[in-house]
Image: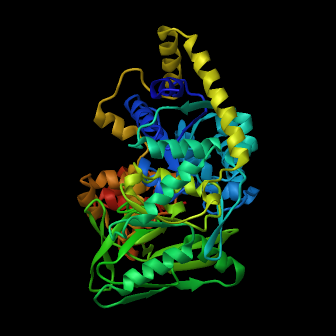
Amino acid sequence: MTQATALTILKLGHTTFLTGAAGAGKSYVLREYISYLKRHGVRYAVTASTGIASTHIGGITIHAWSGIGIRQKLTAYDLDAIEEKANAYKRWNDTQVLIIDEISMLHASFVDMLDKLAKHLRRNDAPFGGMQVVFTGDFFQLPPVVRQGNEYESIDVFAFASSAWKAAKPVVCYLTEQFRQEDDTLTNILNAIRLGEVEEDHYLSLQETSKKPHADDHIKLYTHNENVDLINRKAFDALDGDVRVYAMVTKGKGPILESLKNNCLADEILELKIGAKVICIKNDIERKYVNGSMGIIVDFEQDNTPVVELASGKRVSIKADTWRIEEDGKVRAEISQLPIKLAWAITVHKSQGMTLDRAEIDLSRAFASGQGYVALSRLKSLEGLHLVGFNPQALQISEEVREMDYTFRSKSEQAEIAIDKYTKEQLQELHDTFLTQSGGTLVELSEEDAEDIQDKPLSHVVTQEMLKLGKTIKEIAKERDISEDTVIGHIEKLAEMGDDITIEHILPAKKDVTAIKKAFKELDTKKLTPVFEHLKGKYTYHQLRIVRLLLP
C-alpha cells in the first residue's frame, strides 16, 4: 500500500493498524495525518509504548497519557482513582483520535486495559469507547518485555492477541515502499529476515563488517544491560575530572520497593563527570527533556545539579525526580534519584525508533525475537555497520509474527480493493462526515487557531504545575505573558474540576482570609461585588476570588 492510500483510509476515522518494514514511511504518514487533524480542529493524542519512541513523534508514553502508569491490572478502585483525576477524565473524553506508536512493545493485557478504561471513562461500550485508535508499528520488531533484575525477558503476548484488538477489527494499512535504507544489500538482508529466507551470502555480508577497525564515534548497541554497563563504566573512568556521586533515596521496603527500582531504571548509585554521555529515563514535568533524550554533562551548578547539553544543543539542569507506587490512595514505595544514566552504549531496546548513520552492534547474546532485525534496521547502509558479535539466532523472527504478517498483508490488500470502489466525491463526503462527527471543521484553520485546539498541555494545567513550584499569581502571569485575571481563572477552573491545587502561598494573611470568609457567610452569597462593597473595598477582587475557593 502507498502512503497516499493509507492517508485516505485513516481519514475515514476507522481504528487502523499502520504497519510496514522499517523505513517504509510509517512516521511520515503519521505526521501527515496529525497535520490534517490539526488543521481541521480534531483533538488527537500522540503516544507511544516507550519513552524514546515517543520522542520521535512528539508525544508521551501511552502509560502516562492514559493514567494507567505501571499498573498490571485495573481494579474497580483503579478505574475510580483515574476517573477522579480530572485531567485524565477530560483527556479521554476530549480526544477523538488516539495514536499509539511502537505497538509491538505493548503487551496484549495492556491493550485490554486501555479498552476497559476508555469504555468506563467515555461511558461508551464500543471498542475503545468509540474513539479512533491508530496503532502503528511493526511486529517484526521488539516484542513486549518485562525487566527481571538487571535484564529483560521477552513475553511474546502481542497486542494483536488482545480481546480489544479482535473486537475493534482494525483496518490494516501495510506500507510497501522503502525510504530509509540506502543500499540494496542491507534492504535484501532485512527482507530476508522478515520472510525467514536468510541465506549464506547474507550472513557473509554481515560478518564482513566485523573486519572494520574500531571507531570511537560509533554508538554501541548491545542486547544486555551488563555489556552496556561495562562499556559505559570504561568510558566514564577514562574521563578526567572530579566524580560527582548521587545516591538514590528510598521509602518503603520488600518486593514492592524492589519492583519500583527495577521498573524506573534509575541507578541506586549514579556517578557523573563533565564530558559524560547520558540518556534521560523520565519525562520532565516542564517538558525540558523527555525519556530517551541524549546529551553530555557540560557543567555542575553550585548545588551539584548537573547541566546537560542535549543533542539539540539546548542546555538543561537535571533535578532529582520521584517514582512511586500507590495502592488504595497510599504510597507503598517511593524513590528519588536523578533521571539519567550513562549512555556511551545503549541496549537494542532503547534504540528502537532511532535512525543511525553509524553503529557498533553486538548480537552475540540476542535473546528476543526481532532484536537483530531492530538493530540492523536502525542503519541506512552496511557502510555504517561494525558488527562485533553475532550468532544466527539474532536474525530469527517469531513464527507467530511471520504468520500474522501474511494475514496483515492480505487484509491490507483487501482494504485497497475496498477503497478503490469509492469515487473521489464519495471519499470526500466520508472524510467530511468523520471531521464533523469528531467536532472538527471542514474549513482549514489558521495555524494559530489550530494550535489552541490541539493536544498540548492545557493552559490551566501549566498554571497548576507552576503553582506546585511555588510561583505566585504575578510570577505566573509574567512568565506566561497572560493577565493575572486569566491565571486566577485557571485556578478556579482547576478547583471546579476537583484537581489538586496548591494555593496556600497565594492566600492573603490569615486574619484577612478569616474576614473575607466571614463576609461571604454573613451575606450568604458567592458573588464578589456584594462582598467587595460590604468590606468597603479593603480587599481586591483577586483576593476575594482566591479566598472564595476555600468556601464549601
Measured along the vertical axis of the image, is residue 195 above or below residue 52? above
Residue shown at the point (28%, 89%) measured from the top left: 241
In the foreground, 311 or 219: 219
In the foreground, 62 or 419: 419
Q: Quadrant of residue 81?
A: bottom right
Q: Is residue 58 left or right of residue 401?
A: left
Number of disc labels: 0
In the foreground, 251 or 491: 251
Residue shown at the point (58%, 78%) measured from the top left: 334
Q: Is residue 491 left or right of residue 171?
A: left
Q: Which colour scheme is used?
A: rainbow
Q: Indicate the position of residue 318 as horizontal and vertical percent values.
A: 36, 73
Q: Indicate the position of residue 205 as horizontal and vertical percent values.
A: 48, 53
Residue shown at the point (74%, 37%) measured from the top left: 166
Residue 170 visible in the picture = no
In the foreground, 483 or 192: 192
Measured along the vertical axis of the image, is residue 129 above or below residue 86? above
Q: In this view, does 283 lie to the left or right of 475?
A: right
Residue shown at the point (60%, 60%) measured from the top left: 69
Measured along the vertical axis of the image, is residue 358 above or below residue 172? below
Q: Indicate the position of residue 239 as horizontal and vertical percent values.
A: 31, 85
